[in-house]
Image: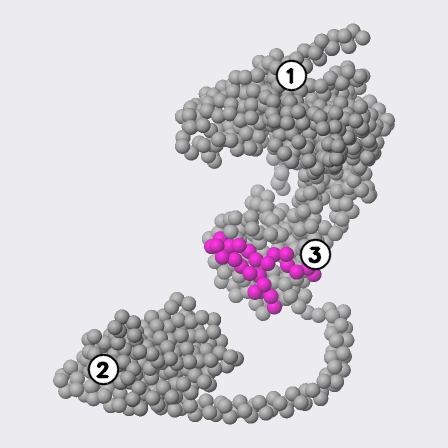
Amino acid sequence: MKYKKLISPGIILLLALSQLFAQKQRPPLTFKSGDWLETGIRVRNFSRNSDYNLSVRYEVSNKLPDGNLAFKVTIERMRLKYADAENNWWGYDSYYPKYMENRKKNLSKQIYEITTNRNGKISKVTVLSAAQKFNFSLISVKTNASFQKEAFSSESIFPAVQVKKVSETIIGCLISGKAMPKTLHLSASNDIVNAIYKSASFTLPTNAVIKGHITNITPIDTIYEFGRKIFKFNKDGSFKADVLIDLTASQMWVMGQFDEYKTFNVYLEPFDTLIVTADRLDFDNTVSFSGNAAAKAGLAKELRPIFNNQWVNESKYRDKTLAEFLTFQQQGLKQFNEVLHKYANRVSTELINDYKANFRITQAGTKLEFFTHNRKGIKPKMTLNDFPINYFVSIDTLPVSMNNSEGGLHYIWYMDWLLSYKKTKLGMMRNNQQGFYTDFATAMASFDGHPLYFTLYNSFREELHKSDLDNTERLKNYYEDFINNCGDTTLTNRIKALWAQARLWAPGNPSPIKKFFLKDGSTLDLAKFKGKPLVLIVNNNHPDILKGYFDLIEKQKASQIHFVIVQGFASNWDIDQQLKELPNVTFVELSDDRNNQKNFDLYYQQTKVFTFNSDFRVISGYLIDEYGGQVADKAEAHQAMQELIKKAIDSSEMTKEQKASLINTIGWSVGSALLASIGIFLIYRVRLTNLRKKTLLNNKIKGLEIKAIRSQMNPHFMFNALNSIQSLINNHQYKEANVYLEKFALLMRRVLNNSEKSFVTLSDELDAITLYCELEQLRFNFKFDIEVSPEVNTQLMEIPGMIIQPLVENSILHGLAQKGDAGRLTIHISCDQRYLKIVIKDNGTGLKENITDGNKSFGLKLLKERLILLSTDGNVGNLDLNSNLGGNESGVTAVLTIPID
């Protein structure tokens, strides 16, 4: 009774203080249907040493005509702990309940419906769904305390009367615009309640302030980050951020660029104010704090280098002896305790205890890493018996369940090393027993709560990452149990996504990977390798790791199987070039940006091998995992690779079942063929008629080609050419005569060589035209130019031989012959998907003079006949002749359009 009398004034004082530190009043909020709010509610009772943390979600399910509101209130998570009379701590976390195999569905949640008036006053509370009863488990160091057999209900933890009282305050403050009180006192139970807003579908009021001034900021220092939100500095370096703080959360303040970050950590609480001053040029030594959160920030600043020094990222302890290492830890513990003693009366006992728990995890993790480091390899430096028994006491007696450091970097690594240590103690590391099943058995025997679920989550993640579908199928029951037991959607959603991705790689499925994004900015479309079995090797390791498989790849026949090697690490090694030279290998480098790469992920120092059949469907996969520069089992990996290749090659051969299916298909096909014989006969008759027509057409084409060849070289030109050569010789211009004669011979040789060919490459045709124009230049002294658009591939594109020459000859003889130096001839070649376009333009005498020339008309007639014969499938060739009309321009433009495939 005396205790109750003493606590009442304290409550009154807390309530008074809450008004002093209350937030500024904000505009009232009008709720609408669909609005939601997530809150954190902490209920403590100091008389019974209980500490209950609840995550509660409010959602407006209905807005009634009279203005009343119906809220659906869901207790998303209960994180409960209390101490018994013997100071044994018991706990329960609804996210991580007692693990039950063959659980068919998730645990239900406690759900209420509350009805409020427009001011937030609650008139009705109804239970919509009751959560299953649960048991508390021992979370402190194990003693002889008996296991809690009493089953508790959610109603006994957070009864409806408390739901009503707390909810009225939370909703009423939002509706009225008043600040949330720092504490609530539930007089009937002596419970102290702290409630905070976490997130909502509308803008929430803030509950803490961090502000200050940083001198000597640079123009690039325009922003800073706090609590994963970005804020802006003022121009003079001052800043202020109104923030929303959780009940127990460490926040990081960061400014600066990568590798030059200026940062500090602090545990801010609701209604805290932190004032920061520092010089950017010497941030770590000049940063100072004031405000009611100054002590918490100062404590974090002084502890940070101690944590960093004791954490495993500092590798200096690895070469120490066991005695030196233990001394190193004792010195760290001494420094840690000295700082805590300095701040003992300036920060809360709860914060001190959180740091103690985190530091114990840090040192225990370092101990485990030291233990693992000295026992790895074929010949370990130390055995388990070399470590004294008391070495592991701080590890074996360290409670990690219900710890506020869950999810932190030190905690995550500690749990990884702790699992390895537990496997060693249980004798499960013998005979190289690794993998999910070993992890599962160890975790079930060693852990409860979050450590158990977090360990299983990591094991699932690593196992599903291997893309080994046979093993994935065996995990199905374990997977379903994990999903149905775990209430933490952060873990389950990730595992669901990995499971779905792993299922994409089931044998027989189409390849989940369609293309790779490469380092040079291009893409590799894997569909182009369809048609023969394929082995895909994606290497996120040093290229030299592939040396062990070079001989195996080299001896495979290119006709039977192809290898695609995608290198995702630093390249330009010797093995790269050796692999590139193999005829059955396509070697490419993966882009550094992996964000666009779907349905595939690969960790550092890992190599994945996949095989596909000729239809580009999955056969199997294998993960080659390397640690410390060595593959764990080279012989096993080599054997696995050999089996994968054999399975891929065998996939192109029919099995007995496939042969039986083929025979059955052939039987049906023969029957169908007999029924279709009449149709085939009729088709044969039609085809025979078409073949006769085609033969006649080919004969006509051959005759026209002969005519075209005969008309290619104008006899008048040949006479003039030889006459010009004779004239040069008579005038003792032997050098010019030799040049003329050489070019004339080259041209004649090209014509004769191509005389038996229906088509020649465009490059050969242009070479002949160039020689022809150069010969005519010796007679008429004009200038010519040949332009080819970039999209035209002259080496691959084919056209009828000497089809351009008649047009060029007409331009020279009948347009440019009288122009002398002023004569200009331009040949421009371009193309689209269906046609090759050749434009021949001169500045000669014009079309009227040319049109009367019978010789030219005969050449054009032959050219047009050839175009008609080239026209197929609706693609029609054409020749247009037009006088140049623009800008007083003389001459003729001939446009020759040739259909192409």
Q: Is residue 517 magenta?
A: yes
Disc 2 + disc 1, Cβ < 8 Å: no
Q: Which residues are magenta?
A: 508-531
Label 3: which secondary element? loop
- Report x, y in % for residue 159: 81, 25
Other-residue count near label 2 (Cα within 10 Å), few / some / many at <14 / 14–19 / ≥20: many
Q: Which residue is mark 2?
A: 817
Q: 385 above or below 557?
A: above
Left-right relation of 763 to 402: left
Q: CA distance from mark 1 to mark 3?
A: 60 Å
Q: Nearer the viewer, residue 788 or 431?
A: 788
Other-residue count near label 3 (Cα within 10 Å), few / some / many at <14 / 14–19 / ≥20: many
Q: CA distance from mark 3 to mark 2?
A: 76 Å
Task: Judge depth for marks 1 and 3 and give the one in front.
Answer: 1
x 46%, y 85%: residue: 869
Q: Which residue is mark 3?
A: 506
Left-right relation of 888 to 455: left
Q: Which residue is mark 1?
A: 18
Which numbered disc flags the more N-terminal residue, 2 or 1? 1
Which numbered disc flags the more N-terminal residue, 3 or 2? 3
The residue type indicated by label 2 comes to Ala
x 65%, y 16%: residue: 18
